[in-house]
Amino acid sequence: MELALRAGLTQLGCSVLEPLLAADTGHRGQHVDCGAGHRAQFVSYRARTIDTVLGTVTFRRAWYQCAGCGHGLAPRDAELGVAGQRMSPGLRKMTARAGVAVPFAAGAGLVGELAGITLTGRRLGRSAEADGTAAAAMIEERAAAIAARKLVPLPPAELADKLYIAIDGTGVPVVAAETEGRDGKGEDGKARTREVKLACVFTQTAVDEDGYPVRDPRSSSYLATFAPAAGFGVLMAAEARLRGAEHTRQLAVLGDGAPWIWNLATRHFPEATQIVDLYHAREHLHDLGKLLAFMLGGHHSDWLAERLGELDAGDIPAITAAARTFPLTGIKARDLTTALGYFETNAHRMRYAHFRSLGMFVGSGAVEAGCKAVIGQRLKLSGMHWSCNGATGILTLRCQQASDRWEEIWQQPHNQTPHADLARQAS
């Protein structure tokens, strides 16, 4: 009975929606701009059929043809957000929500069961990826404008005491064409994944009763891209500036010690405090202990415990001095130099006792959790192989969702699909 009533109500909704859409015929005079610098001429009124959250509707609207560039357009389609689309913005928003949550076939099943709309997984996926890709293009355009100082973000209404930029990367499985000519870690030396770089920007105002920093609730925003480090840096810096990086009292960059992270931090925010994730530093220290285990013998555990204490205190010179007391030669000596280079290069980023005395975070757990929750739980499931464009679309939608910015994508009904995609979709 419930499902039957719902079906009847949606049919009734369609009967109401069609005349509402047809009330404005979209006639904007005998000529309109075609979008390419020419004037398109009114030809006739033509029918258009689209799928909506209420079902399929048909309406007539004015059609214009451009003699200069040969293509036609309907101004009413653009106003309704359905230019080059077969779904209404409302239905696309619904399919995108399902597509970022579960695999596309399962998402189509959810839309069918919960909303009574029949879609194939392929259609749902194409729609979600296209809207996400368009949102990514808008984010890139805004970032470029901020980088060029053509757009200067206003500071947030409420500035937090500390703003953190946590950066990490993770591999996403892709189709073979996306790894052509790339070296990988597999036994055959071929790449199976492409790295996605992720930034998590969050704020901190207080510490808990034990003096440990507490991330402000709902303060995390995420940004992910396949772009090389330079392109990621522009996006990351724009996101940080939107969050008030140039106005906050304390700005910090958290990372695992990879040089590209610090290069970007120095380039975009030279004033920021740089902090190597403590847990990555401990892993390197454990590796150092394994390297010297044959020299330490039964004293290995005590030696390592003492070095871990020095690391927590930020006493990197003590760690390197203790390790260099062993008379190593050859390969072992080179391995030791490489291992200690990590600590010596990052010594100023490992002043953990000092950072903690200031009530600051010394771990990049927020972005590592983002790699798992935002990226891994949707794009790294068994059997998945993505194109970079498709993965970018879903990544962007998931980042917007995790950043509590989902509605921003849909505020302008005709901004989801780039013009370059219209001809392909129409065909």
Image (tube, helix red, strand yellow):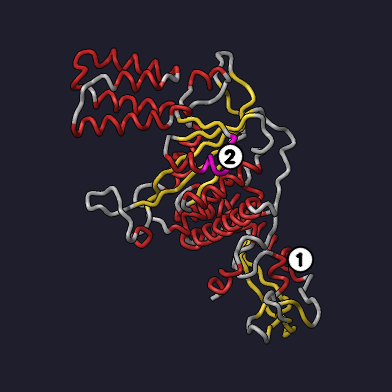
Which numbered marker is on residue 20? Answer: 1
173 or 53, which lies in front?
173
Tell me which residue sits at (45%, 51%) in the image.
Answer: 103
Residue displayed at 34% across by 14% down = 306
Tell me if residue 319 comes above or below residue 32 in the rendering. Answer: above
The residue nearer to you, when weighing 417 against 57, is 417
Which tag, 2 or 1, sits closer to the chain's start?
1
Can you say whether 252 is above or below 418 in the image?
Answer: above
Q: Regarding mark 1 in the picture, which secondary structure is present there?
A: helix
User: Residue at 59% of width from left, 55% of height from top?
Assistant: 140
Looking at the picture, how far across and down is residue 23, in whole percent? 79, 70
Asked if the stretch drawn in magenta spans residue 265, the answer is yes
Disc 2 residue type? Answer: Phe
Q: Identify the main secondary structure in magenta.
A: helix
Q: Nearer the viewer, residue 381 or 150?
A: 150
Q: Kindly identify the residue that appears in the image at 65 percent across and 61 percent down.
A: 415
- Location of mark 2 (residue): 269
Residue 197, horizontal then vertical, whole percent: 47, 46
CA neighbours of label 2 inside 10 A, class few (<14), some (14 to 19), many (20+): some
Q: Specify the farthest residue to the right.
A: 29
Res 377 visible: no
Q: Nearer the viewer, mark 2 or mark 1?
A: 2
Residue 288, percent across and down? 29, 26
- Span of residues in magenta: 264-271
Three-letter amino acid code of the residue under disc 1: Leu
Is any part of residue 263 visible from this angle? yes
Task: Verify CB contact (< 8 Å) between mark 2 and mark 1.
Answer: no
